[in-house]
Image (tube, helix red, strand yellow):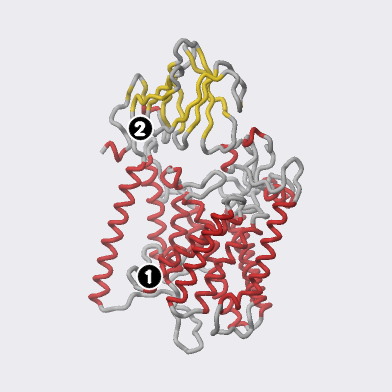
Amino acid sequence: MAWLLERSGRDEVANLDTNQLGIDEAFLTFDLGNRSQAWLYTLSEDCHKCPFELNSKIGHLESNVTKISTKHAWTLLLTESDEGLFVKNSSSKICELQASLGQFGIYNVKADKCKIDVISKPVNIYAPLIAVASLLVLIGVILGFISSVLNYCRKKQKFEPDRESSKPENNVQRRRVSSLDTFRGISILLMIFVNDGAGGYQILEHVTWDGLQLADFVFPWFLWIMGVCIPISVKSQLKRKSNKFLVLISIFKRSCILFGLGVMLNTLGVGPKLETLRIFGVLQRFGILYFLTAGICTIFWPTNLKTTGRFLDLRTLFPQWIVHLLLHAAHLLIVFLYKIPGCPTGYFGPGGISENGLYVNCTGGVSAYLDKLILGGQTHLYQNPTTKFVYKTGPFDPEGPYGCLPSLLTVFLGVQAGAILLLYKKSSERLVRWFLWGAVCLVSGFAISIIIPINKNLWSTTFSLCTSGSAFLVLVLCYILIDKISLWNGAPFLYPGMNATIMYVGHMVAYQLWPWHWSFGRMDTHLILLVEALWGVGLWTIIAYILFRKKFFLSI
């Protein structure tokens, strides 16, 4: 079982105790040949366009062993003299080599030959992930089969929760699309899993700056799903209230509740210290984007909604498309034309030590600069962004106020999906349009990424397109399995998807509370961290199922 427990079974190798290593750590030893000392500089592949950073001094009089992280590959540089904290081009280089290291491995760097020998092989950190994922899939298949057999024996139709109250004009009652709740549930459980550490797996966490990893899809998927629901909600409210002003008041109230709830959650663990309170965050962005997108949708929603004709969805949303395209064009003009003191226009970089510190105070470009102007400084920004630890930057808020402007595109692409759901009754019509929108968004997003990088922190245009494109395709898959061929009822994701607000707020409040979280021993393997994270996800799923059975659904 050593392969599963991530331990080789040998605690001491080459006089080194591997029990001293933490998760994602390895030992580096050095053979300097005839040299008495050297300086080790390191450069992580996660730090783009960065200089080498001093790691340690090694030699006969100092320790010739150092610990090093294995989360990313490294470029190692050995020099004959101390060249300062950072160095771009060494004048006393002994050796420079690439190193992809593994957890609990022991390696020896031979300076004369400029190569790395493996003294003790690393463990396979992905074995627990594969084993646990396979087990969960197997359990899901078994439970699904049992559920199908029971339903067949009882000769009942698949239960479809929370039926929509509005009826089409032919008086045939339309059911709520369960795949949408399931998609929302997938997003909320994935978010809880990531926030609980994702088992310590770097590939499941947020990317530091440019690029996309699994965790980066969660937030935009949520916003996109909110957008899907907006035209359905607006149509329903206009039918009940028959007054757009009253609908706008209702939208404003909900937005204020979301924003206030987000600010309240920002005080968890730090207290309500007003002079340093982080004002913006996840729910705050939800509130602002809901107000803007739902408000625009309400204002421009046609009084006499047509239900026939070609390009029905585009004709219905045409005025809204014009508004949103103008808003996004304004964002791009600001990004590429607004001049920031000491920074180039159109800067998308992380600043800090990137590019040898040339733009040290330009992290996030115009987005961060305007956030500081709006909030009167950086004390109300997020103080510990990922860039702080990799690029040595200052505070930066990935959910800052300016980021709401480019994020509108994500929500409105969800509105487009919602309009298709609302205006087209046949499954084939919906699926074809969702698939085409998904393909177009993905292709255009990756194509434009040559100019505008895919970046969650800045919520770049390409990030909106790629994440929204993936959302279209995920909805297509869920819709086929759940609503079209009824091969799956959406469980267990359906249940948390119908109480997403409780799930989000609850897991934030209970972040360090038992029984959702616990520790045992050193917690120094991916297996134990993975079990702990999935334990919390499982408990919240059970809570969501209980609420579902009690027919308790919280809606703000």
Q: Is residue 106 left or right of residue 37?
A: left
Examine the rendered structure and indicate whether residue 40 appears above or below residue 201: above
Q: The disc labelled 1 sits on which kind of residue? A: Ile
Place of residue 510 in the rendered image (x, y in percent of width and height, measured from the top left): 48, 52
Q: Is residue 78 left or right of residue 405?
A: left
Q: Is residue 267 visible?
A: no
Residue at which label 1 appears = 482
Q: Is residue 490 left or right of residue 499?
A: left
Marks 2/1: CA–CA distance: 43 Å
Residue at which label 2 appears = 122
Asked if labels 1 and 2 touch by Cβ distance under 8 angstroms, the answer is: no
Place of residue 375 in the rendered image (x, y in percent of width and height, measured from the top left): 72, 50
Residue closer to the observer: 358 or 239:
358
Q: Residues within 10 Å of mark 1 (few under 14, many from 20)?
A: many
Examine the rendered structure and indicate whether residue 446 appears above or below residue 548: above
Place of residue 243 in the rendered image (x, y in percent of width and height, measured from the top left): 66, 81
